[in-house]
Amino acid sequence: MHLAKQNKPDDTASDWFVRLHSGGVTSSVQRNHEDWLAEDNRNRMRYDAVEHSMRDLSGIDDWMRAEANRLNARVMSRRARRTKVMVAGFSSLAAALAAVTVGTMLTMANRYETAKAEQREISLDDGSRIHLNSASSVAIRYSTEMRTVELHNGEGVFDVSHDAQRPFVVSAAGAEVVAIGTRFRVRLADGEVTVTVLEGAVAVFNDGAAADPTSPERETTLLYPNDQVTLNDGGVTAVESVDALAATAWREGKLIFDATPLRQVVEEMAQYTQVGLDVADDVPDYPITGLIQIRSPDAMLRFVANAVPITPVRAAPERIVLHATPPAPL
């Protein structure tokens, strides 16, 4: 299990510059930037140095969007060529056999999956890595033109090796995430896709809400470090500023919560237990704050029971229900 590498101070200053000049900057991001500047006078000096070096440059977001559209055009071009091969394949038996051969070369996938409470790191032949969370599955298709990963369910963190000639695309439930040299998380749950960036930048496209999903000019959402969006049939949410390392702390055997409702905490914990976890209907949705080690289900339950007045009760061999702890007798 690899640890997320820490940015060098100059890299952090550069990341802040890119985020603040990416357009649509929220007040939360601005406050976080001001807090970072106030932490250390050297932070302000580094940021001023980056800003000075970039003073004569403009259109950073335009460049990022152009780069994303270039990569997206390559993705769409490849998709169109595959479609033509399939259509031509139906015209004759010989063409069909050829199409099957070509289609197999292009679409043969390596499939990986994890069971409940299992995690797995996958090293790819281009130097990229995928860290799969519990109960997750992916299909990986590499060709000479493109690197594609289909997330069928669950969650993965993608550490992408840069290759300008072969875009790296993660698809999930109609959404496509095009990496521009980066580390990011994609989570598919209940039909919603959540994308979180740890390092670098990604371009997010949502076919589910697009009028013409094959157009290379699809609307693009650009994400930078600690940005997150959720995609579904209704479109794309506004970009949210989050703690990306906390969101992916499961890679290090941890779950981090900050005033998170009890039922959401239990739902997260249940990914790492072989038994089902439920909360009784009469238990309030207490806020939970703290760090939970996921290696021991018993330790997770003890943490929650110490944090709020609940008692775990084994209702069946494969099911534990959290009930309200009765008040102590007077």
Image (cartoon, grey):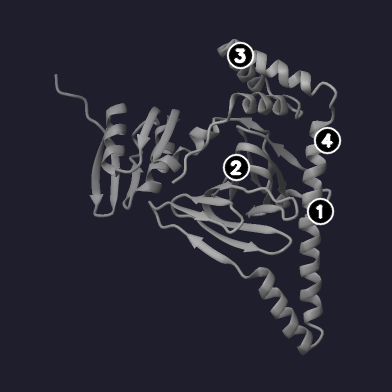
Q: Secondary structure at mark 3?
A: helix
Q: Position of residue 230 (x, y in %)?
A: 62, 41
Q: Which residue is mark 3?
A: 42
Q: Secondary structure at mark 4?
A: helix
Dot 1 crowding, Cα within 10 Å, few <14, some 14–19, many 20+ = some
User: Which residue is at a point 60% across and 42% down the rendered structure image?
Assistant: 183
Dot 2 crowding, Cα within 10 Å, few <14, some 14–19, many 20+ = many
Judge left or right: residue 54 versus residue 5. right
Which residue type carries mark 1? Ala
Judge left or right: residue 30 versus residue 321. right
State the quadrant of the C terminus. top left
Q: Nearer the viewer, residue 61 or 51?
A: 51
Q: CA distance from mark 1 to mark 2?
A: 22 Å
Which residue type carries mark 3? Arg
User: Which residue is at a point 80% across and 64% down the rendered structure image?
Assistant: 80
Q: Specify which label sits upstream in the sequence, 3 or 1.
A: 3
Can I make out residue 36 in this image? Answer: yes
Q: Nearer the viewer, residue 299 or 320?
A: 299
Q: Which residue is mark 4?
A: 62
Dot 4 crowding, Cα within 10 Å, few <14, some 14–19, many 20+ = few
Which residue type carries mark 4? Asp
User: Which residue is at a point 62% across and 16% down the rendered structure image?
Assistant: 43
